[in-house]
Amino acid sequence: MAMIEATQEGMPTREGDLSVESHGMEPIPESARYGSVARVFTVWFTPNLVPAAFFIGTLVTLSFLQLGFVTSILAIVVGNVVGATFVALLATMGPRLGLAQLPAARLPFGKSIVVPGLLNWVSTIGWDGINNVFGAIALTILIPGLPFWVALVVIVLAQGTLGVFGYEAIHLFEKWGALLLGAMFVILTISIFGQADTSLTDGFKGLDQVGAFVAMVAIVASFVLAWALYASDYTRYLPSDTPPRKVFWYTLLGMGLASGWLEILGLLVATKAIGGESSDTIYSVLGGTGSIIASVAMVAIVIGTVAVNAMNDYTGSLSLQAAGVRIRRIYSAIVVAILGFGFTLFLQNNGDFSLNFFNFLLFISYWISPFVGVVLADWWLRGRHADARSIVDFGRLPSGTLALVALIVGFAVGIPFQNSSLGYEWGGPFNYVTANYLHGADLAYYVGGAVAFLIYWFGARSSLQRA
């Protein structure tokens, strides 16, 4: 497999430049860098003001969690800080390298980037499907009688267009979306507070309660940790001398504040949302038919869906290129949007949405922490500097065997520490340690990430320090 030749054409030149970004995964030259670092906050704030985050807050009533109100608040705060910290660390790579996240991962993974590249491409399609369900349902509520599939087409066309136009269009949409959605959700927050239920109490005691708390932290962290595979995609055009500390804090605060906000709103109405899909739940809680505030909420959900899925389509297009597939970025973005459309229809017509959402959120993301472990180990061993041009030609990449082994071993070692309903269905080693010794506490992310980090760190330390 070969990559498209690097070119400086087809790149935005300034803030507000809405020309189509035909440039692909190749490094952004210093001469083409631009933009305010403050936009890093809005590019992560807006796409996390979504029903998926609200839905996570309602999960505290599930039988294996049964968390009280105060315990849930603490789990939401801790989970967001843990997950967002790793995304923020990776986002600092963008200005230094001028590379998106999966292309930058060619540094440790070499040719084996095919595995995480294709995995992330599939993940972006999956996230498209999850988010589309919320957005399309919200649109059918706004327009009674509108078929679900027609609403879905509207959502997919909007997000696909943004994904095709690329980096600058997405930044602009997220910037103005932050102001609009922020105002809308302030209104919705005031309305929800008027009927909030803070009476939830912990359903377990002792170590069982600790296990439930840790499991909820993992669920919350997994939602923001999934952005780790997108992290430097939206900082790669920033000047190389952009302070890493600013990139880190804008990233962490942008996603942590937004997702935590929506998760707490979900928590406040969790007792009214058991088994319900978030768009329907929000609409009902805010007054339903005839309520202006409920209609405003549906508009916010539609906008939020477009905001988050445009980033899925954009990152998906770069992930496919990083895997070595010869396809122009704009066509790849279109493919992700279309496949997301199909996956949405599958989710909508197959079983319990709550169960499907929970299984997808946890299981498909267990490989992400070992990936993050490998990439961070490599980046720190290199002293946070590397030649971005070395990753362009797929044919000249090293094998990347060590990185792939670290990822696979990290994932495998984490399997017994998972807490996924799929594990209980499949049996074997899945969930074994968690179910039998950890009182349901999900430690798979931490175990898998740490193991992968250590394997790569000690395996590559000598060669990278000599380079």
Image (tube, grey):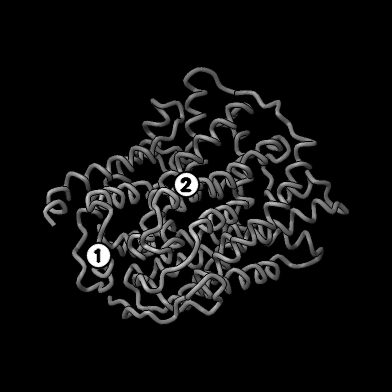
Check if mark 2's residue and mark 1's residue have beta carbons within 8 Å: no
Task: Name which residue type carries label 1.
Answer: Asp
* Element class at badge 2: helix
With respect to residue 259, does 205 lie above or below? above
Q: In x, y percent, where is residue 323?
A: 33, 68
Q: Nearer the viewer, residue 147 or 23?
A: 23
Whether residue 326 is visible, yes or no, is: yes
Q: Residues within 10 Å of mark 2 (few under 14, many from 20)?
A: some
Q: Residues within 10 Å of mark 1 (few under 14, many from 20)?
A: few
Whether residue 364 is visible, yes or no, is: no
With respect to residue 354, does 179 lie above or below? below
Q: Residue 325's quadrant in the figure?
A: bottom left
Q: Nearer the viewer, residue 364 or 451?
A: 451
Q: Residue at x 51, y 67 (%)?
A: 313
Q: Which mark is residue 249?
A: 2
Instruction: Classify the position of the C terminus by image quarter.
Output: bottom left
Find the residue positioned furthest to the top.
206
With respect to residue 96, does 212 lie above or below? above
Q: In x, y percent, where is residue 86?
A: 40, 46
Q: Residue 157's quadrant in the figure?
A: bottom right
Q: Nearer the viewer, residue 387 or 210?
A: 387
Q: In x, y percent, where is residue 384?
A: 28, 53
Q: Residue at x 19, y 63 (%)?
A: 399
Q: In x, y percent, where is residue 382?
A: 22, 53
* Residue underneath mark 1: 387
* Element class at badge 1: loop
Horizontal side, residue 77 vs residue 106: left or right: right
Q: In whole angstroms, how far apart are the C-alphas of marks 2 and 1? A: 25 Å
